[in-house]
Image (cartoon, grey):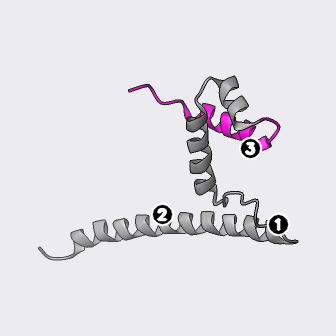
Amino acid sequence: MPKPFPMEFRRDVIAVARQGGQSIAAVARNFGISESCLSRWLKIADREDGIAPDTPAAPARAGEGDLEAENRELRKRAKQLEQENEILRRATAYFARDVLPQ
């Protein structure tokens, strides 16, 4: 199994691909990775960033960009709150086992 690429490398490749100056095939060729690998990285990054895939059939309406940006921010905040909630739940369970009789 080949060694995975470092996250910094992936972020750089994704940033260049998202700029849109070159095709995905050209970006992949320039960085020495396969086109399918770059496509998979882009899909994963879009999902993590809360970006919906581009659909040429649906034209962008005024204000949609603002809603999408707000939606991304809200998803990030919700994920952060879920992580904080999990930490608090585990801390409560840890301290409760010392207080409760066995």
* Quadrant containing the N terminus in the rendered view: top left
Residue at the spot of label 2: 83
**Residue corresponding to mark 1:** 60
Q: Which of 25 and 82 is in front in this view?
A: 25
Which residue is the site of mark 3?
A: 18
Lower sequence index among marks 1 and 3: 3
Which residue lies most toward the front here? 57
Residue type at tag 3: Arg
The magenta-colored residue range is: 1-22
| Dot 3 crowding, Cα within 10 Å, few <14, some 14–19, many 20+ | some
Identify the residue shown where x is 79% and y is 35%: 22
Mark 1: few/some/many CA within 10 Å (<14, 14-19, 20+): few
Q: In which quarter of the image is residue 67?
A: bottom right
Could you tell me which secondary element the residue under label 2 belongs to?
helix
Q: Name the side, left or right, on which 100 lies relative to 48.
A: left
Does residue 64 appear left or right of residue 24 in this picture?
A: right
Spot occupied by residue 16 in the image (x, y as percentages of width and height): 74, 36
